[in-house]
Amino acid sequence: MPAVTETIETVQAVTDSGYKWGFETDIEMEFAPKGLNEDIVRFISAKKNEPAWLLEWRLRAFALWKTMAEPRWAAVKYPPIDYQDAYYYAAPTQKVKPKSLDEVDPELLKTYAKLGIPLREQEILAGVEGAGDTPAEGRMPIAVDAVFDSVSVATSYKDRLAKDGIIFCAISEAVQEHPELVRKYLGTVVPQGDNFFAALNSAVFTDGSFVYIPKGVRCPMELSTYFRINAKSTGQFERTLIIADEGSHVSYLEGCTAPMRDENQLHAAVVELVAMDDATIKYSTVQNWYPGDAEGKGGIYNFVTKRGACRGARSKISWTQVETGSAITWKYPSCILQGEDSVGEFYSVAITNNYQQADTGTKMFHIGPRTKSTIVSKGISAGHGQNTYRGLVRIGAKATGARNFTQCDSLLIGDLCGAHTVPYIENRCATAKVEHEATTSRIAEDQLFYCRQRGLTQEDAVGLIVNGFCREVLKELPMEFAVEAQKLLQISLEGSVG
Amino acid sequence: MLKIEGLTAEVDGKEILKGIDLEVPTGQVHAIMGPNGSGKSTLSYVLSGRDGYEVTGGTATLNGVDILAMEPEERAAAGLFLAFQYPVELPGVGNATFLRTALNAVRKGRGESELDAMQFLKVARQRMKMLSMSDDMLKRGVNVGFSGGEKKRNEILQMALLQPSMAILDETDSGLDIDALKIVADGVNAMRGPGFSALVITHYQRLLDYIVPDRVHVLIGGRIVKSGGAELAQELEAQGYGAVQAAA
């Protein structure tokens, strides 16, 4: 029908220009020479004024990386990456490290304002009060660490958090100010030689966030890091380390965007979480890297290693991710459940539209007795998108009474996309209980028509149905971000039905 | 007022509607009766704009506006409502969210202000009370796990909320026990008035005992072969469609 063709065309136009975060900031940058070798590793370490032990650590990682090969087991296809044809360090030129926001380059401030990321503390409050139908007292301010290419440019609410003994700063700063903590934990959850991309990150990581929550402290606000790739031909290699000491509690959110470019850019991050006795870490991600255009040109290659160690008894680590961006997503946020009665959770929504490919899932290692894990994965494929859930549940011999519940649901929109589920289960304990459920469904024509007959537009109908499909995951997100994520899902799927 | 003239339509290249002429004046309730495969459901889908139901000729206007050129959602905003024979399940979508989204979409289309969650709940609760529906229907997923009767009542609730000027009820009586049938009929009768008209599509005369129509039309083989007053329904029940068909 002509009306349908018209809808497709309109929607295509929207999709092509639909990535609202695709602008570029024109700012004076400092680059390391292109390519990767020991000198570059030394250059980065020197730039960061790092102690000798850390340079050694990096060089060991680099040596390991050279012996490793890119993993090829994931269900993603991409041309070979030339690791010598990229910049490994790019930072806005700054004479001295800014002491307050007033000293930060106004171009950078403008960038974050444009992205809707509040850096000024008073602005955060003002924004919250004006935020609409939710009463202001129901909302908490959010502390933000802003990472621009290779460096952290600002961190808000540091002083306020310090009153509770909480450390929230750029990891490069933590290396200077709290070397004992960084040295004690860095690489203990994701070792340098863990995998190809983790080794690369360990050699050349430039910045990222560091969080330490002391014993018994409940972090009074959401902590978040906002990652922005800006420079051309530059990889981003950030490293995040979060330590929750005994009985503490923290909720952390990560967001990310990048300019629209024809080239593919590499993002290889490492996130390490450590939870001691009775500690809880909730880590939420809204990943919105540039996905490439409707023909599959450009976009971020997102090769990320995220892992949390539940070291203490009754500790809990909960991963929630909404993956809408990137040309390729390769990411398996995992939990090592060492402490007895510790709990690991993974809630995921992954969308692939146009030519996006995602191979994502989780690994749950049950080591301690009565450890428990829950996996809820929702994959949505549209256009030519390919979406794979890959998960491992491994239950060790000593994990008596361990339990896992896994639910993987796939939703297909159109008939050119694909959904795949690859669950691995290894159980070495007779008293453990493992459950796995999986479904694949399609947005049915009758569902769309039903919604449209009730007055909803086609796009709104898809949004409503998809949000319903993802509800179990979205409700795990902090409230403010759940609304954002809902809108993002809809934008990501624009043009997927016609 | 709904006015249909010479309407022909096909599905998968097969002509199903072969020239329908029908007028439902504002304020009236008309019934369409007919055997299986006569084109009753096709007529409801053609009027509401479902994909795959191709209009090949004729016109249909609602209150003077050509609806055949509109998208389904535009027809809804123009005042057309279809109560589905098989209401569709939307897993994970809360009934309250769906009803409010639909109501606000239609209000927006009509240039009215949108209702916030509190305003909506107030209106919804009031209408639900009228339909003897319990509040927890709002908390459940749209039609998910609803019994046949609950699904149909949910359709009537949506109609009561959206306040259409023209409602098509497609075999709303199928699968209903007598109590549910009465509740549904009460819901329709409560809406009767000068600003509301309805086209009640049914197989059996039973529903028409409760929703007494102003006119009854018999649809056979894609054409309206006979029209009459409410008594025509009784006649059909007694004699069967065969007699009408033979006479036509």
Image (cartoon, rainbow, N blue to C red):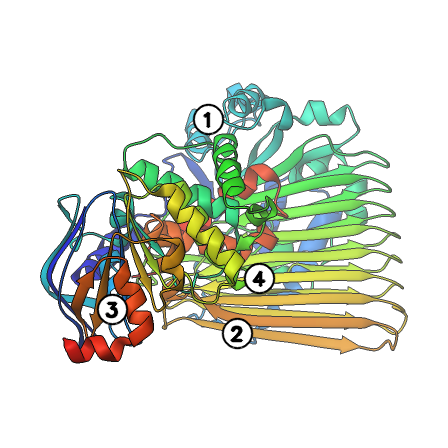
Q: What residue is drawn where x is 86% and y is 37%?
A: A215
Q: Which mark is residue A105?
A: 1
Q: Nearer the viewer, residue B60 or B149?
A: B149
Q: Nearer the viewer, mark 3 or mark 4?
A: 4
Q: Nearer the viewer, residue A26 or B216?
A: B216
Q: CA distance from mark 2 to mark 1?
A: 46 Å
Quadrant of res B111: top left
**Residues at badges 3 and 4 in contact (C-beta under 8 Å)?**
no
The chain holding disc 1 is: A
Q: What residue is drawn where x is 54% and y is 75%?
A: A72
The chain holding disc 4 is: B
Quick check: B146 above or below B113?
A: below
Q: Nearer the viewer, mark 3 or mark 2?
A: 3
**Residues at badges 4 and 1 in contact (C-beta under 8 Å)?**
no
Q: Which mark is residue B145?
A: 4
The chain holding disc 3 is: B
Q: Nearer the viewer, mark 4 or mark 2?
A: 4
Provide the residue designation for mark 2: A420
Helix, strand or loop status at disc 2: strand
